[in-house]
Image: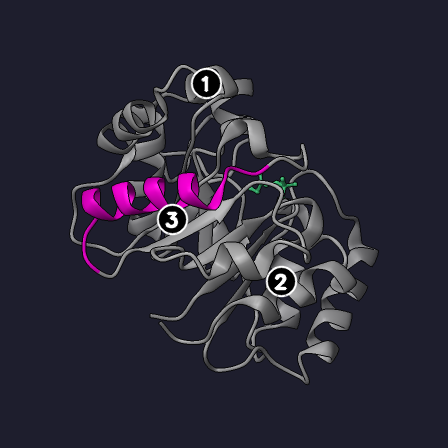
């Protein structure tokens, strides 16, 4: 399988940030190498413009969230169909910032993943434990429960991102042993061929080591995806086809 290096821009980036993608593509020599996939998930306001600009480039565009329904009276929300219509290929669902800030349950995350399939998008389903849960020895149990509640049961392909909440934006990362243990665990709970991403303080300095861990098939990168100078070395650090 091809590793997937995905950038989650969160609520960052105005139209001028397109320059960072142009710079990234220039560093990549015009397009991402054939043996890895590169995805940028910008704020919803930029999805259509970016998807139109890069439709011929080997960089994909994704959304950061979607509503479970296709349309209706849901002020401020965006459906998976709208993201697909705007040119997105992927959508992140169940990010811990949405689970925490918007009360998203596993059942809602699962409904969003199913909405992504309905619209022809590939969902990136996020799971991860808090600091207290990790310190209490409950990381596997918590992630196991999130997986059983959030993963769709259809045979369609999805991506799982393991993002320990305490590692997001903190500069902290689990040990290689803990990442390996968790990814082996997630592998045992997901269909063969499912790509498993690690996310949480992935930086140019630690990407190579993390991406070399078995059952880590890519990264979901927050802060370090905003600048081409930081994101490019992470894309390059991924091993080729695995
Ligand atoms: O939440 C993340 C990606 O979805 C990770 O964020 P950071 O890379 O900034 O820690």
- The quadrant holding residue 208 is bottom right
Sequence-wise first label, 2 or 3 = 3
Q: Nearer the viewer, residue 206 or 82?
A: 206
Element carrying mark 1: helix
- Residue annotated with mark 1: 135
Q: Which residue is drawn at 56% across and 27% down?
A: 166
- The quadrant holding residue 64 is top right
- The part of the chain drawn in magenta is 173-192
- Residue annotated with mark 2: 234
18 in relation to 91, above or below: below
Left or right: residue 224 compared with residue 55 = right
Q: Distance between the residues labelled 2 and 1?
A: 29 Å
What colour scheme does the image use?
A: one colour
Give the class, few, some or many, for how many residues have Cα within 10 Å of label 2's Cα (few <14, many ≥20).
many
- Residue annotated with mark 3: 123
Left or right: residue 204 compared with residue 146 = right
Left or right: residue 167 compared with residue 113 = right
Q: Distance between the residues labelled 2 and 3?
A: 22 Å
């Amino acid at each position: 399988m091809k590793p997937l290096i995905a950038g989650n821009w969160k609520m960052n980036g105005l139209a001028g940030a397109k320059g960072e993608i142009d710079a990234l593509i220039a560093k990549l020599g015009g397009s991402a190498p054939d043996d890895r996939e590169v995805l940028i998930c910008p704020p919803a306001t930029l999805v259509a413009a970016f998807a139109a600009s890069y439709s011929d480039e080997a960089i994909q565009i994704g959304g950061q969230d979607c509503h479970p329904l296709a349309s209706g009276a849901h002020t401020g929300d965006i459906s998976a169909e709208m993201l697909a219509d705007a040119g997105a290929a992927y959508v992140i669902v169940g990010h811990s910032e949405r689970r925490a800030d918007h009360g998203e349950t596993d059942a809602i995350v699962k409904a969003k993943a199913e909405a992504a399939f309905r619209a022809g998008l590939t969902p990136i389903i996020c799971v991860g434990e808090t600091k207290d849960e990790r310190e209490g020895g409950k990381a596997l149990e918590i992630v196991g429960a999130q997986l059983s509640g959030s993963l769709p049961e259809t045979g369609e392909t999805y991506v799982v991102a393991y993002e320990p909440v305490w590692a997001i934006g903190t500069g902290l990362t689990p040990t290689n042993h803990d990442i390996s243990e968790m990814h082996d665990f997630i592998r045992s709970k997901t269909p063969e061929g499912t790509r498993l991403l690690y996310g949480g303080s992935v930086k140019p300095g630690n990407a190579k080591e993390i991406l070399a861990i078995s059952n880590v098939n890519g990264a979901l990168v927050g802060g370090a995806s905003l600048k081409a100078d930081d994101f490019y070395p992470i894309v390059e650090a991924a091993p080729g086809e695995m």
